[in-house]
Image (cartoon, helix red, strand yellow):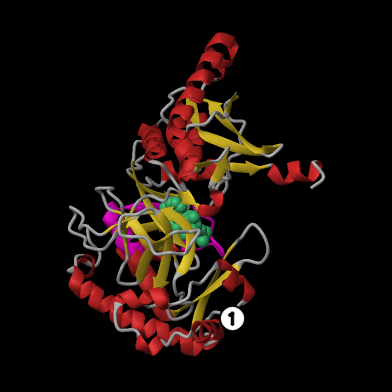
Amino acid sequence: MFFQKEIETMNRKDLEQLQLERLKWVASYCYENVKLYHDKFDRAGVDPYKIRTLGDLRYLPYTTKEDIRDTYPYGMFAAPMKQIVRIHASSGTTGKPTVVGYTKKDLDTWSDLVARLCAAAGATDEDIAQIAFGYGLFTGALGLHYGLEKLGTAVVPTSSGNTEKHVMLMKDFGTTTLISTPSYALYMAEVATRLGYKKEDFKLRLGLFGSEGCTTEMRDKIEEAWGCFATDNYGMSELMGPGVAGECELRDGLHFAEDHFLPEVIDSATGEILPEGATGELVITTLTKEGFPVLRYRTKDITRLNYAPCACGRTHVRMDKVIGRSDDMLKIRGVNVFPSQIESVLMTVPQVGGHYLLIVRRQGFMDTLEVQVELIDSSLLTSYTDLENLQKLVKNKLHTVLGIDVKVSLVQPNTLERTTGKAKRILDLRKEGEEKAGK
Ligand code: DLL
């Protein structure tokens, strides 16, 4: 289903014309209203008034998370505070959060774009949607909230945490649509089972999952656990929040809202723009944002773009599911490994569950990886031979895909940490090792 059919199916020539007009606007708007951009343009000798083609985007300087941190809290707001009506921030594990602001028009666009992706995934005004993202500075909950309301869906703003209550309300309210991270959706299904519910007790038919990666294998597991159809949507607070891209019902890539965001894919290491279809770091320019516009923002997310129109009729570019973040890529004995590759393998082994932890250590000059994954049934622990065989099987499967040996530890069910938001799947002990080694 379409929310803004005319725009979503616009022919590419018209779309590119629209993008060009908007690119010219946003480049000069940033230059005139944000000191950081003004200085960067001047230093690079770039004149924002001279943009003639979309290809001229390549001359604009990149923006990074550090730029946002350096101008904390409001240094990159382009609209006067009088026009800012909402402030969000990303938590950030280290240091200060990154703070973003929205004008009324930004909020209106935001809810349109979220409504777009929800409709594309199959949500309608007949649905009852339970939002299990945390309400607060995080963009996930309020972003989905207003987008779904715009679509006419009944929103249940449960927020994250208190999983047992979530499950109860889901049953009692006849919730048809769940909004959460994929890992929390899986955890909620476990809690439902523990409380004695069966999936038939629920009316859940659709999951709109996002905010963290989810392989198709993990998606299968969640769909099986809930008996629902699951889709993936992508976004980040620096760009707006959710609403940047989302899957339609065909699930053949995430449709970008290309009338508002201009994507590029670059080589993370060199900063070079990669040709169409190549895998690399996603870089995004916002085309219409007033409160917090960003030019060529380095997302650190690794993906690929596909400009072919989708069979659903949408013409905007599609991005592949995110493989991982460039800063989450592990280098184990010279081989690059993304956690998602490991997830894909683990999820094909029926005896293990959906929760896993990757522990990286340094031994001498080498990095080593231990993959901890939960068994779904503790009775497997009673037979040493069965356990050893399973361990070997997982190890071999991982070796086939990754080309390296990793340590596999099969752990008791329900022992790895659950989170109600983004799962923490990497435990990096390298720093500790270095300290112990006196470095
Ligand atoms: O997670 C915004 C969001 C909320 C998107 C709800 C979708 C649904 P941040 O907290 O700023 O914003 O985190 C952004 O999360 O750079 C990706 O690394 C990751 N991420 C977000 N969506 C996906 C996804 C929100 N569908 C960061 N697949 C991004 C993989 C995702 N990673």
Q: Position of residue 94 (x, y in %)?
A: 67, 59
Q: Where is residue 366 in the image (x, y as percent from the top left)?
A: 65, 37
Residue 123 seen:
no
Residue drawn at x 19%, y 65% is: 9
Q: Where is residue 93 in the image (x, y as percent from the top left)?
A: 64, 57
**Is 115 displayed left or right of 46 in the figure?**
left
Residue drawn at x 43%, y 36% is: 344
Q: What element carries label 1?
A: loop
Please state, as top left, top right, bottom left or bottom right, where the N terminus lies in the image.
bottom left
Residue 302 seen:
yes
Residue drawn at x 25%, y 59% is: 307
In this rendering, the answer to whether 27 lies above or below 344 is below
Q: What stretch is highlighted in magenta?
A: 114-142
Number of labelled discs?
A: 1
**Is 59 displayed left or right of 237 in the figure?**
left
Q: What residue type is labelled 1?
A: Gly
Name the residue nearer the viewer: 229 or 398: 398
In this rendering, the answer to whether 158 lies above or below 150 is above
In this rendering, the answer to whether 362 lies above or below 142 is above
135 within the magenta span: yes
Is the residue marked by circle 1 packed among few (<14), some (14-19), or many (20+) residues within 10 Å? some
